Image (spheres, rainbow, N blue to C red):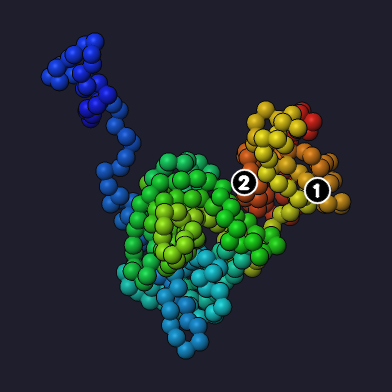
Amino acid sequence: MWYFSPQLTFQTAQENLPLSKARWVNISPIDMPSDFVNTSAVATKSVCNITVFRGDYRSSAGSGVILSEDGYIVTNNHVIEGSNIFGVTLYDKREFKATFVGTDPDTDLALLKIETNNLLPIRFGDSDQLQVGEWVLAVGNPFNLSSTVTAGIVSAKARNIQILRDRKYSIESFIQTDAAVNPGNSGGALVNMKGELVGINTAIISESGGYEGFSFAIPASMVAKVVADIKQFGSVQRAILGIIVGDLNSVLAQNLNLEKVEGVLVQTVTPGTTASQAGLQSGDVITAINGFPTRSTPELQEQVARYRPGDLISIDYIRSGIAYT
């Protein structure tokens, strides 16, 4: 593709070139899909509408994502909270009554089940490999409009927006996108260009109550762990290090002899906990869990949340300017 380079078309006092002799340059095309047809066709078949019955009225509450051929569906906890009667409508208009399997308010995820077979489950993608600037689609049922698809890019990763601050062990490490998400999209799928699940759409930041440019999704890596725990144990088995942490700033990094303002500062170590037994100390800076960088508190929380009590993990940290593994 050819693009006209306007900075080279103007006449200058020195050259006084006519426009006919202005230079043209060949600029590499932006890696942008021509359309999202194939991705949409794959993803919409695995996203359903969830209707929640509360009291004497019926309200369409949100969306869900089909995880298995035999009817397991993941959604947000806030979509189904406060009710025990749920209806599910598939992309082909078939309707089912769903049963409650389990929930994890600390990540705002819940698991439902419908009795049927031969569903089209979504494929999981690798949310760890998702990059800022990558194209994604949000699939759901905003305002009860079934099978709605919007497109955007990943704006940021590991965002903590404090929507679960009332939970003691809340975990927020959201994927931020600019794909349009509105009421009813909650619990729906965020997918990559292969139609693979990379997140569950959960929240927006809004002053009006509607979409204003930013939406947030729970990473698929966390979804997979929470769902597996609920199916196996009925609740989430959550590992806890036993530390109080905080993010770094440039002053702290300089005082701690750090080359970069990256990592999570250990502020307090609780005696008798795993972190204490492993030898972590106040003032240490954790830089990675099992080789995955932890540049901020949300990234640390996300990594630890993938493990269960009793699992072994490796921790990279810096103490007095010296790196340890």
Three-letter amino acid code at disc 1?
Answer: Thr
Question: Would residue 48 be visible to someone looking at this image?
Answer: no
Q: Residue at x 12, y 19 (%)?
A: 20
Looking at this view, is 14 or 73 the one in front?
14
Three-letter amino acid code at disc 2?
Answer: Glu
Rendered location of residue 302, percent (x, y): 62, 50
Q: Secondary structure at mark 2?
A: helix
Residue 268 shown left or right of residue 106 in the figure: right
Residue 71 shown left or right of residue 258 in the figure: left
Q: Residue 114: which numbered mark, if any? A: none
Rendered location of residue 194, percent (x, y): 38, 47
Rendered location of residue 74, percent (x, y): 50, 64
Question: Would residue 35 be visible to someone looking at this image?
Answer: yes
Looking at this view, is 193 or 60 the one in front?
60
Picture layout, residue 6 above or below residue 224 = above
Q: What residue sits right under mark 2 in the picture?
A: 299
The crowd level at tag 1 (other Cα within 10 Å; few <14, some 14-19, many 20+) is: some
Q: Secondary structure at mark 1?
A: strand
Q: Earlier in the sequence, mark 1 or mark 2?
A: 1
Q: Residue 268: which numbered mark, if any? A: 1
Picture layout, residue 293 above or below residue 123 = above
Q: Residue at x 23, y 16 (%)?
A: 12
When asked about the image quadrant of residue 77, the answer is bottom right
